[in-house]
Image (cartoon, rainbow, N blue to C red):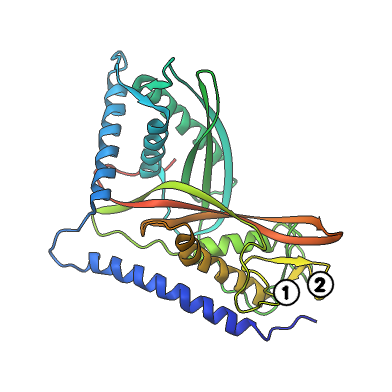
Amino acid sequence: MKHFKLFSAVLAALLISSAAIFNACSKQETEIQTSGTEAVQMSQADIKFQNQLVAFKSKLDFKREHPGYKSGELMSVDSAIYLMEALFNYTYGFPEKSYKKFKHDTCIIILTTNSDGMISLNDINLKYLELKSAIQTLHYNSGFLQKRLLLASIEKGEVEGNTVELDIYTVTGELGGTAYPFEEGDDWWYGHEWGRCDETPGSDTIDASELIEINVSLSYIMPPAPPGYHYTYAPEDIIEVLGNDYVNPNNPTPENYLDYLLFYATQELENYDECLEHEEMNFYVESAYYLITSKLPEEYNKPSNWLFMGCDYQWDDSQLNGYSVIQHKADFTFGLRYLVQNQYDREIL
């Protein structure tokens, strides 16, 4: 038998912590929006970011309008990655929409540099078009009918001679909502797409790890931008969290029940169970919300515009000290948020 004596207290503590942070953010955004006829205040970082985007987009647009023009401008690989990623998310990203499911994809494109490790603006223009084509293919193959791109991240990969791999990571969302919180009887096997613990027919296409992932993303509400503006995000960090990385401070003695902020169970202890009942499902969603809004930003000493963008949960089976261990692992993606004017229309891929 599972026991639930700690659930209410634990969840309440995390909810209070997370709500305080969220309310503070909401109040700040409300003040921007309800300032009457006063001009919207953009930070110096916002202005600098927007100016970089406008200048970069203008150069690419000019190149496309004048294909015979050969620009002699060169750029470092790091600068090219930063600007291509930022412009792509500005143009095609819709992180503020409501989604009910997510699809994570990866692909690779190759940059070619000169002998000094630089890349020409002409080649950057071609690579940006290649980037768009590659991400469009992933987007179209997501299996969703009503969808938007949530984010695209570009990471510098292997370098060999004058070629550089660019590792592309995308998140496509299926538009809609979800039925959260989980209610009585809404109990799910931890992984393997085993479905509901009562083996409801047709439920074996999803599991607890996927449902927690979906609801973590949906529980974090992107604040709306003031009229005439929108928020854009420059993906910056992907932080991996293992099941036993963060101990539940309200449950210091491991007992295979809410021991950690992510799901973790070992056969070395009693109460080993592969089924997560609905109270546990809700706890792990709220615990992740606490991680992304409070614990991780504080631990990594990040600025206030370093915000959660999305997550990828996976189930894991392993052996430790001769005992079976089951757990959830999560990759949390964070980005730097900037307020920009609506100088260009956003596009749907």
Which corner quadrant holds the N terminus? bottom right
Which corner quadrant holds the C terminus? top left
Could you tell whether 289 is left or right of 124 in the image? Answer: right
Residue receiving disc 1: 254
Identified at 32% across, 51% down, the residue is: 338
- Numbered badge on residue 269: 2
Q: Earlier in the sequence, mark 2 or mark 1?
A: 1
The local crowd at label 1, few if under 14, some if 14 to 19, many if 20 or more residues have their Cα within 10 Å, is: some
Q: Where is residue 328 in the image (x, y as percent from the top left)?
A: 68, 60
The local crowd at label 2, few if under 14, some if 14 to 19, many if 20 or more residues have their Cα within 10 Å, is: few
Residue 137 in view of the camera: yes
Residue 145 vs residue 278, the one in the foreground: 278
Q: What residue type is labelled 2?
A: Leu
Q: Which amino acid does label 1 sit on?
A: Pro
Q: Are marks 2 and 1 in contact (CB under 8 Å)?
A: yes
Position of residue 61 relative to residue 105, above or below, is above
